[in-house]
Image: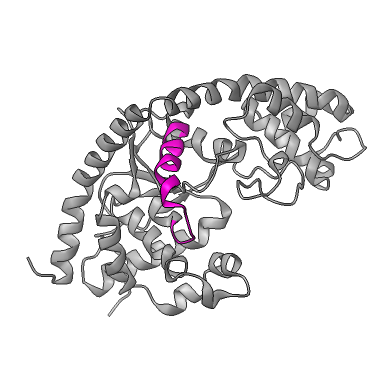
Amino acid sequence: MTDQAPVAYAGPARVLSGVQPTGALHLGNYLGALVKFTRLQHETETFIFVADMHAITQWQDPKLLKSQVREIAAAYLASGLDPKVATIFPQSAVTAHAELAWIFNCVARLGWLDRMTQFKEKSGKHKERASVGLYTYPVLQAADILLYKATQVPVGEDQRQHLELTRDIAAKFNHDYEVPGFFPLPEALTQGPGARIMSLRDGSAKMSKSDPSDYSRINLTDDADAIVQKIKKARTDPEPLPETMDELKARPEANNLVGIYAALDGRTSEAVLAEFAGQGFGSFKPKLADLAVAKLGSVGEAMRGYMSDPAEIDRILDAGAARAREVAAPILAEVKQIVGFWG
């Protein structure tokens, strides 16, 4: 016998991604994800969901969860996602996610999940107290992606391992059930400038909605005064901005602020340095604050407008869920047939 390359997937190109409704979205989410989603919707069929099923792997107040889902949806819409172009929906409104996840739980291997570093980070020293869902959520993530046969997934560095798991599950399903090319092996979409925005208080830590200090991040709902104040108080060092990227990369806080300016202005960090090299932060920060207010002010205003009309958000999410179910249903039905389920 001769080794043969696996049969390639021949279906349509699709993009899928989602954000958990576990806190206010911030500048890092906007530059690292939302701006990219807005661009991708005009290039490839795009599915963007609110990951409320993933959210409950850690305790969420049921009284707040629906409003948190609406807030993420409002951020999607305010950032430029068009529900007439992209499919925007709550994950829990499409029960096929959970059904496919169970099948994939029986395809994935325990050793694969044991290697997932995010579970170790999130569970800490008390993994016995963590939910089973937190341990198996990378399998649900694989179901999210493959339920729509997504071929491209925008991911940060912290999610690349989970995308590799998705590819392993797809390949094993295709092999074990002798359906070559049934599921695609999805590719990571590199996110370019702005993909990793760091904390305003610590240039070595990613900007996070779970950071106890509100001054560590710029929230999408912050008004102009709050944005200016947070950039003014952002941690820096006493030296002026350098001339080269090598020098900049050795200074994490300076590198972060230059990177934020570049991402907001649609330029490279090299181009920003060419303009500001030799200037101190007393000169640079006010210009960065003006740019951030100009770019984010309209997003925050639009978000507040959407949040004031929850019925409209619900209408958009319900329509998106109906579209998602329409796409997912025949794929799940075929999977059940392949596996040998009744009916």
Q: Is residue 159 magenta?
A: no
Please identify the dominant SS of the magenta region. helix
Instruction: Please state the horizontal and vertical placement of residue 228, each as a whole percent of the image.
Output: 73, 25
Residue placed most toward the observer, 215 or 157 = 215
Instruction: Please state the horizontal and vertical placement of residue 88, each as a whole percent of the image.
Output: 34, 37
Question: Magenta residues?
Answer: 56-75
Q: Residue at x 31, y 31 (%)?
A: 316
Instruction: Please state the horizontal and vertical placement of residue 339, each as a whole percent of the image.
Output: 18, 70
Q: Is residue 68 magenta?
A: yes
In the depicted structure, whether residue 343 falls above or below residue 253: below
Q: Is residue 72 left or right of residue 24?
A: left
Residue placed most toward the observer, 151 or 327 = 327
Q: Residue at x 43, y 58 (%)?
A: 56
In the depicted structure, whether residue 106 falls above or below residue 306: below
Residue placed most toward the observer, 324 or 180 = 324
Which quadrant holds the N terminus? bottom left
Residue 150 visible in this rendered orientation of the protein: no
Instruction: Please state the horizontal and vertical placement of residue 20, each as a whole percent of the image.
Output: 47, 48
Which quadrant holds the C terminus? bottom left
| Identity of the residue furthest to the right in this view | 238
In the depicted structure, whether residue 34 falls above or below residue 116: above
